[in-house]
Each structure stands twice: as C-alpha cells, then as structure tokens.
Image (cartoon, rainbow, N blue to C red):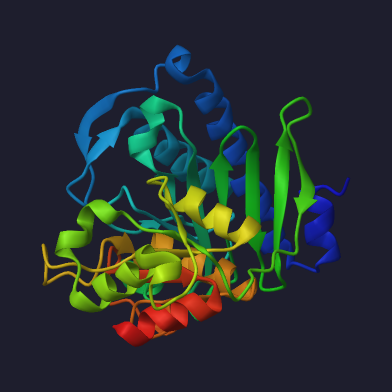
Amino acid sequence: MKTLEHYLQEAHAPDDLRRLLLQIAAICAEISGQIRLGALAGIHGDAGTGNVQGEKQKRLDVVANELFVQGLSKSRLVCGLASEEIDHAVDVPGGARLLAAFDPLDGSSNIDVNVSIGSIFSVLPAPTEDDPIQDADFLIPGSKQLASGYAIYGPSTELVITIGKGVYGFTLDPRQNTWLLTKGPFRIPEETQEFAINTSNARHWYPPIQTYVNELLAGRTGPRGKDFNMRWIASMVADVHRILCRGGVFLYPADQREPDKPGKLRLLYEANPMALLITQSGGEASNGSENILIIKPSKLHERVAVVLGAKAEVLRAVNNC
C-alpha cells in the first residue's frame, strides 16, 4: 500500500507543506496512542479548566492541544499557529511561511463513553513579511487554504486530507506507526436519504430550518416522497466522515437562543477545513446564505452556521433559509 509520504510526493505537494502534513500526521498518531489507553493514561474526566470559548475542558482537550502546540512549534514547520483552545495566535520565530489552525480534539463529550472523536486542521499561507504572527494573519477566506484534514479516532484511526487535488484517506498501522492509503478519492452523491442534526434543539431553530427538517421527518408521506434516516454522533469529525464515506447532509444551524451569534461551530478550526474537504469531494458547504469558503473572518474565534454535504440537499436547505 502507498504511504502518506509517498502519496504527497506523487501529488507534488510543496516540500514545506509535505513536511508539515507529515508532522501533523505524527501528532495525530500520538494522540491516537493516548486515546487507545483511555483511562489507563489518565485522560478521562474534566480538566478543571475552561477555554476561550467559555467551555469546560476535558483532560484530553488539554493533552491534545499541548501535543499540537509543542509538536508544531518545535518542528519550525509553521511560523504561526492558532488553536480553538487558545485565546490568540502563537508566533513561531524562524518557522516556515505556513500557518496552522486546528481543533485539537473534536467531540469532547464522547471521550468518556468511548465514542469516535477527532482532530481537525487547516493549513494557510503566511504573510511574506517576516513580522511576528498576529491574529489578523489568520483572517483570510477558507478558499485560500493550502490543505485541510482531520484524524478520526474510532475502531481504527484514519487521516483524511486534501491539498486541493481531491480527498484521500489513510489508515494508521500502529504496528509500524505508518499511515497507509486506504480510501479515495472520495465522491459525495448529490442525492441522499440521510441527515445529521441535533433535533433536541428543534424548538430553538428558526422557521426555515424547522420547515426543512420537518419535510425530512415526514418521510414518504410528506412533500419529499421518501424516508430519511437521521444520525447524530455529537462529533463533527465522525458525522462528516460518514458523509464522505456514504453520503448525507450535516446541519448545525444558528438558533434563537443566542440571536447575536451566527452559529456555534468555529469558522477557522471546524467549518473551513471541513468545507474544503466536502467541496473537494463534490459536495456543498454553506452558512445558510453563502459559500462558507468565501467568508472573510473578522476575528480568530468567529462562529458560523453550517450546512454541508450532498449538493442537492444543501441547496434545498439553503433555499429555505
């Protein structure tokens, strides 16, 4: 089987980008090793701390973030990094002219119950000037990403990446600590009968989303004339991975609980990298009114509504908004 390094060489990834993606893969493999040990590694339970989002951190949130920050900083393969768990961008003096943004541990609520979780990452071009990296350097549209991907820590550990030339999946062989090409190129069918949304929030949704989801729930006796299955894993990585593998649509809309916020998911660390993967696989990604990848962030931890997956379903949901 082809290794990750072999694939990146054949895909003519620039040398700095190739080495950075291999370093990120190595960090994800290390996180995977911690997760396999579970409670034996002391990573379960609350950390007793909170992040910039005001969310309680799990111990594994802290461990994964430290592995990303230390691994990327020491490698000097980036000149700046931004994490969902850190208030501001981190400058890395003397690093390559690349930026990395990441959600080190997605799906924290699943950690202690042994359900799939993941890590999400995005690679961006850095300014050409050799000045210290600041938050503003990350505030560029997702269409400018050089690469994005995620690791999913499930029954096996997989790494899914794009460098703008399709989307491919690699499985970690823990016996040799090697990533081997096992899937891809992914293609998302335009039509689907599967959707992912947290229906416990239904009473808070705005009417257009309520109307769309009610159509799906009505099944073959409703206006859609067919039955839909609902899935919700409470891990964006796991839900998106399922969509890449067999189709579907994922929705995390804004709702009326916090009308001043455009959504819950983070544009830089979650929406942008996933939107690039989805569009590279033939799908669509929208915030309800425009393509996610054209949005210019106004701040580092900006939130956004997300509808992504099968093209026909995304367009139908967006037309309701």
Q: Nearer the viewer, residue 294 or 250?
A: 250
User: Which quadrant would residue 109 be assigned to in this image?
Assistant: top left
Residue visible at 79% across and 49% down? 181
Percent position of residue 255, x then y: 18, 67
Judged left or right of residue 67, residue 15 is right
Residue at 53% over, 47% down: 72
Image quarter where the N terminus lies is top right
Drawn side of residue 247 relative to residue 317, left or right: right
Q: Quadrant location of residue 175?
A: top right
The extreme front residue here reads: 221
Number of residue marks = 0
Determine whether 286 is above or below 150 in the image. Answer: below
Residue 188 in the image: x percent, y percent? 63, 69
Residue 135 lies, in percent from the top left, at 32, 67
Quadrant of the image occupied by residue 302: bottom left
Q: Residue furthest right?
A: 1
Residue 108 position in % (x across, y down): 36, 38
Most foreground residue, 132 or 309:
309
Q: Residue at x 72, y 73 (%)?
A: 165
Q: Nearer the viewer, residue 297 or 260?
A: 260
Q: Residue at x 40, y 49 (%)?
A: 232
Q: Quadrant of the C terminus?
A: bottom left
Left or right of 266: which side holds 27?
A: right
Is residue 133 in view from this perspective?
no
Please state which of residues 134 and 150 is positioned toward the viewer in this rendering: 150
Rendered view: 5 above or below 38: below
Could you tell me if residue 9 is visible in this image?
yes
